[in-house]
Image (cartoon, grey):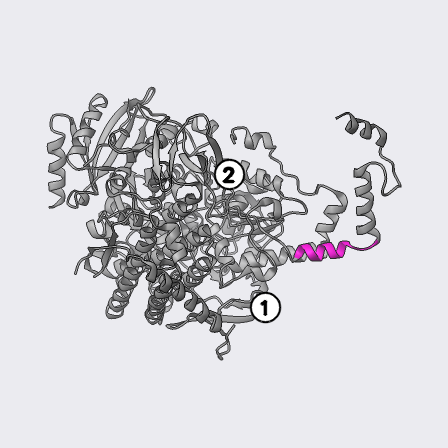
């Protein structure tokens, strides 16, 4: 059946309905007072273990890079750029070769994942970490060496407890520690 | 009622006013001379096209014109709502002026203000013609015109570094 | 009017070395030095400031979605003692959520100037760092040119955890480096001046 | 149909008296207060409203937009077609898929391709998840405006359920950049449809509680009923969109009048309310969430039955190397062919529309057959709704402005683009 309109009216409201409405609101409030639906993440004591497909920070595997420039061309924010080096070619002694590798500037990166998806050899990949902050801007403009280092989530480094959220038809999201056993608040 | 019927309803309303038809994907636009645009708008309005979806201006420096298209459709007539009809006016680029249609379609009021600041098109008879989104110094430059250049960055960073061995 | 003038005349030039008499400014400075320097109240000031970072309710752009989510039940940033507040006069933190347009830049500076110091700024999202995807837009300013920014968060938008991390890092910065007490001791903070003069930002402002 | 002359549109004339509940107000002209609200204010800021008051009754309201104008239309002219998707997405990142979808459709119209069946359902899936999340966001902000903090906490908590779903599907909390010309970027991960059904069941239960604590709450009703009434003919005249339009009794929803993607095959209703006041606008949103949940269930059933193929048009996927197909079967991630970086779109003009969370969004895309679009024009729902402040708010007391602002669900970044 195709989409169709359905005309309705806001239910009318009298004195009795107002009394009922007040009591209903209080009853719902009481219900959650007695049985709260807590799912707060106690960051940084706990942190969410991000799923493998999460579009977090990006790391380069230089060995796989074929210098095709696709990532730099598709980057919508011009955050990924190619750096160029001229060095002797190991395969053809005496000849020089132009090497091009991508570097990323996290001042601009919008984590759209286009570069990872367009890379024909999977040389770029996402790291499930997205809670890194910086004190100054210069640190965020990575060079080739820094781009190959996998950034670690600070919460993980500090020894936080990894948790994940599972869906529940009664409570929406439920926080579960990574090693089984359901956790409450 | 199909899209052709929407088109023929608009064509009927605009008969004698339009000078050309332009087929777009998802809409059909009728070219109207600037001095007859009010007449065309009134005809469309009484045919049931009751609101403006978009006042679209396109700068064409090669032809020396700014084209203003009012994309209109209908809320009150569910059959006309299926299609989108445009009326297009070509204005000279050096002095673009046209009568405002916001007296006929109130929904065009803010969008005409937007076209005014981004392209410099003056809508005569507009109740409140002043910039809406930009600060005054920028609004005078009409940034959506093609001669306002915004530079994009290239894919290379820095020059070529010479190294003794491959990186 | 005349009594006021005569009282000013009686006060004379600021007297150094005496605490409770004479020029009010000098007296206040002396009290500040005594409390923060000799009595080591600075640590208390830093401790207190770190756990009462109240961000002003000033949304510059779309990262406001994640700003709101950070104070929502799942991430609950109120646990850090940070509560978004309405009036800039009662806040000491500004979170710049995304792009600052030229029109907003003036408002940002006005809000920043209304806040009492010690005050801090967090730049959230790529747009607040180097423009992000709008890096070449003609209508934006870099927020670190408008207000001095302490912590930068990359991402578009950053996760709420990242904003929480920024607040935690800012608390650490305040407590380890004593930014708040130093600021009170030394008066206006000099290390991060805002390069764009206010006249350039607000030349068009009305109201 | 009425001509605008008959409607009382611009505040009121000097010397004219108007009857308001319990008082008559005359616009004197000189004795007006002018106050500036924003851009720093407790709601979801970034907009200034200049209000002229007579006593505490608004006589003239001038919305001052543009505080978040990031020049998307200009930047789009310099960037290749694929780069425009994340660019326009920043209009309303809480409603990302709905906002980018018509742009992608317009490009597809120009290229004369149509996504395969499964991609259409995947797009509908994310669109409806986004719509629910966007409505919940709007209701939460409405709660902030009214000082009803439970109504901020609950929808924002429940919104996380749908944000989490979207994150599992696309890999990002808000900025999905999900549809691309020809298809989508991810397929559903393992166990996703089961999670989706759980979330739907949970949300159904919660909506009942929302009704008890918010919609049927006498305090809220007293604040919203009869406030900011937009009569049907005025709603049509002002050209407002989305739930605000449907709360005024106009049966218009792009999903219904011009079904795009898979909406024509799905069974759902478009709730329309007659009253046109702030309360009806809140009701429309709740009813729409119910219908979106209904759509999600149908999409989940459909996706389970379909074979896991056809998420990208053959033009882009037929020649994909083996690595690409491996990545897809392993992770469900659709890799983009390098030709996406330099997508050449045939010359032409296309117009596309879709029903986003806040209403109809329209795109006009013109291509000259080059790598970049010649012109991208977008009119967002909030920009079309902004006119409500000017024509509906006058005549109300100042304290009704938060109720009107909140009920319109106005999102400034979307309006300013």
User: Residue B15 occupies which quadrant of the picture?
Assistant: top left
For residue D96, which numbered disc appears in the image?
A: none
A72 above or below C6?
below
Residue C48 in magenta stretch: yes
Q: Is D184 left, or right, of B143 in this rendering? A: left
* Pick the front one: B70 or D108: B70
Q: Please report, as a chain letter, where disc 2 is located.
A: C
Spot occupied by residue D189 in the image (x, y as percentages of width and height): 36, 68
* Pick the front one: A23 or D292: A23
For residue C104, which numbered disc appears in the image?
A: 2
Classified by dominant secondary structure, the portion drawn in magenta counts as helix
Q: Is mark 1 on a helix, strand or loop?
A: loop
Q: Please report, as a chain letter, where disc 1 is located.
A: A
Span highlighted in magenta in the image: C39-50
Residue under label 1:
A45
Q: Is B36 left, or right, of B117 in this rendering? A: left
B135 above or below D260?
above
Task: Let me know if marks 1 and 2 both belong to one chain.
Answer: no
Do we see residue C206 in this rendering?
yes
Residue A5 in magenta stretch: no
D139 above or below B13?
below
Query: What is the residue that sits farthest to the bottom in this orientation?
Result: A181
Spot occupied by residue D316 in the image (x, y as percentages of width and height): 29, 54
């Amino acid at each position: 059946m195709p989409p169709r309109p359905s005309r309705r009216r806001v239910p009318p409201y009298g004195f009795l309905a107002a009394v009922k409405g007040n009591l209903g609101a209080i009853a719902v409030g009481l219900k959650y007072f007695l049985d709260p639906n807590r799912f707060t993440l106690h960051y940084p004591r706990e942190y969410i273990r991000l799923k493998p497909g999460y579009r977090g920070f990006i790391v380069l595997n230089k060995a796989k890079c074929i210098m095709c420039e696709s990532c730099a061309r598709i980057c919508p924010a011009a955050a990924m750029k190619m750096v160029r080096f001229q060095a002797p070619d190991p395969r053809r002694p005496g000849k020089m070769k132009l090497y091009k590798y991508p570097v990323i500037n996290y001042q601009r990166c919008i984590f759209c994942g286009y570069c990872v998806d367009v890379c024909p050899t999977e040389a770029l990949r996402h790291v499930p970490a997205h809670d890194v902050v910086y004190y100054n801007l210069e640190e965020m403009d990575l060079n080739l060496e820094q781009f190959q280092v996998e950034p670690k989530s600070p919460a993980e480094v500090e020894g936080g407890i990894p948790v994940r959220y599972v869906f529940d038809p009664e409570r929406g999201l439920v926080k579960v520690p990574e090693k089984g056993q359901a956790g409450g608040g | 009622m199909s899209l052709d019927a929407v088109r023929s309803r608009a064509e009927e309303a605009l008969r004698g006013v339009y000078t050309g038809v332009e087929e777009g994907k998802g809409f059909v636009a009728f070219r109207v001379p600037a001095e007859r645009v009010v007449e065309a708008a009134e005809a469309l309005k009484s045919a049931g096209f009751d609101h403006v979806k978009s006042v679209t201006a396109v700068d064409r420096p090669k032809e020396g014109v700014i084209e203003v298209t009012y994309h209109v459709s209908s809320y009150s007539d569910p059959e006309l709502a299926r299609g989108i009809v445009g009326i297009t006016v070509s204005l000279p680029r050096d002095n673009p002026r046209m009568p405002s249609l916001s007296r006929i379609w109130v929904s065009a009021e803010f969008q005409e203000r937007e076209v005014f600041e981004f392209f410099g098109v003056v809508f005569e008879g507009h109740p409140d013609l002043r910039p809406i989104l930009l600060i005054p110094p920028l609004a005078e430059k009409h940034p959506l015109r093609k001669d306002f250049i915004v530079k994009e960055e290239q894919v290379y960073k820095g020059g070529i570094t010479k190294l003794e061995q491959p990186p | 009017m005349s009594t006021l003038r005569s009282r000013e005349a009686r006060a004379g030039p600021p007297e150094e070395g005496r605490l409770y008499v004479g020029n009010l400014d000098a007296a206040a400075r002396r009290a500040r030095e005594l409390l923060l320097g000799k009595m080591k109240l600075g640590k208390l000031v830093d401790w207190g400031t770190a756990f009462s970072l109240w961000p002003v309710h000033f949304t510059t752009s779309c990262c406001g979605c994640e700003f709101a989510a950070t104070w929502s039940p799942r991430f609950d940033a109120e646990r850090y003692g940070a509560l978004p507040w309405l009036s800039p006069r009662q806040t000491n933190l500004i979170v710049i959520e995304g792009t600052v347009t030229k029109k907003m830049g003036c408002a940002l500076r006005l809000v920043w100037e209304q806040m009492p110091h010690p005050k801090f700024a967090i730049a959230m999202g790529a747009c607040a760092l180097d423009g992000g995807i709008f890096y070449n837009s003609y209508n934006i300013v870099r927020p670190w040119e408008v207000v001095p920014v302490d912590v930068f968060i990359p991402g578009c938008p950053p996760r709420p955890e990242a904003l929480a991390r920024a607040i935690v890092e800012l608390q650490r910065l305040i407590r380890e480096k004593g930014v708040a007490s130093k600021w009170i001791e030394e008066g206006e903070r000099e290390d991060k001046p805002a390069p764009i003069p206010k006249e350039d930002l607000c030349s068009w402002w009305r109201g | 149909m009425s001509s605008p002359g008959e409607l009382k549109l611009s505040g009121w004339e000097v010397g004219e008296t108007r009857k308001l509940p319990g008082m008559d107000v005359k616009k004197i002209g000189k004795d007006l207060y002018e106050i500036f609200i924003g851009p720093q204010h407790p709601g979801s800021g970034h907009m200034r409203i200049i209000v002229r008051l007579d006593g505490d009754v608004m006589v003239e309201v001038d919305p001052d937009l543009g505080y978040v104008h990031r020049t998307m239309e200009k930047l789009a002219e310099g960037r290749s077609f694929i780069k425009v998707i994340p660019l326009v997405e920043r209009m309303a990142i809480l409603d990302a898929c709905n906002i980018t979808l018509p742009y992608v459709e317009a490009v597809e119209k120009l290229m004369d391709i149509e996504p395969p069946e499964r991609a259409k359902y995947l797009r509908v899936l994310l669109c409806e998840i986004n719509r629910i999340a966007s409505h919940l966001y709007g209701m939460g902000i409405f709660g902030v405006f009214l000082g009803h903090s439970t109504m901020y906490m609950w929808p924002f908590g429940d919104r996380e359920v749908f944000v989490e779903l979207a994150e599992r599907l696309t890999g990002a909390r808000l900025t999905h950049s999900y549809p691309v010309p020809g298809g989508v970027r991810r397929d559903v991960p393992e166990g996703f449809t089961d999670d989706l059904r759980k979330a739907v069941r949970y949300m159904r239960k919660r909506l009942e509680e929302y009704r008890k604590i918010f919609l049927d709450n006498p305090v809220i009703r007293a604040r919203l009923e009869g406030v900011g009434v937009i009569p049907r003919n005025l709603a049509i005249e002002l050209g407002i969109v989305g739930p605000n339009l449907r709360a005024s009794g106009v049966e218009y929803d792009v999903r219904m009048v011009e079904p795009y993607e898979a909406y024509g095959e799905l069974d759902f209703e478009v709730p329309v309310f007659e009253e046109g006041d702030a309360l009806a606008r809140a009701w429309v949103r709740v009813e729409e969430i119910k219908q979106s949940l209904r759509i999600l269930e149908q999409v989940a059933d459909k996706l389970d039955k379909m074979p896991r193929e056809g998420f990208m048009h053959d033009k882009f996927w037929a020649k994909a190397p083996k690595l690409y197909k491996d990545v897809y079967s392993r992770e469900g991630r659709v890799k983009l062919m390098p030709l996406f970086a330099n997508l050449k779109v045939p010359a032409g003009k296309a117009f596309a529309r879709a029903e986003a969370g806040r209403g109809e969004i329209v795109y006009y895309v013109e291509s000259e057959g080059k790598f970049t679009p010649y012109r991208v024009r977008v009119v967002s729902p909030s920009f079309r709704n902004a006119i409500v402040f000017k024509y509906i708010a006058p005549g109300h007391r100042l304290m009704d402005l938060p109720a009107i602002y909140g009920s319109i669900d106005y999102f400034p970044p979307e309006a300013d683009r």
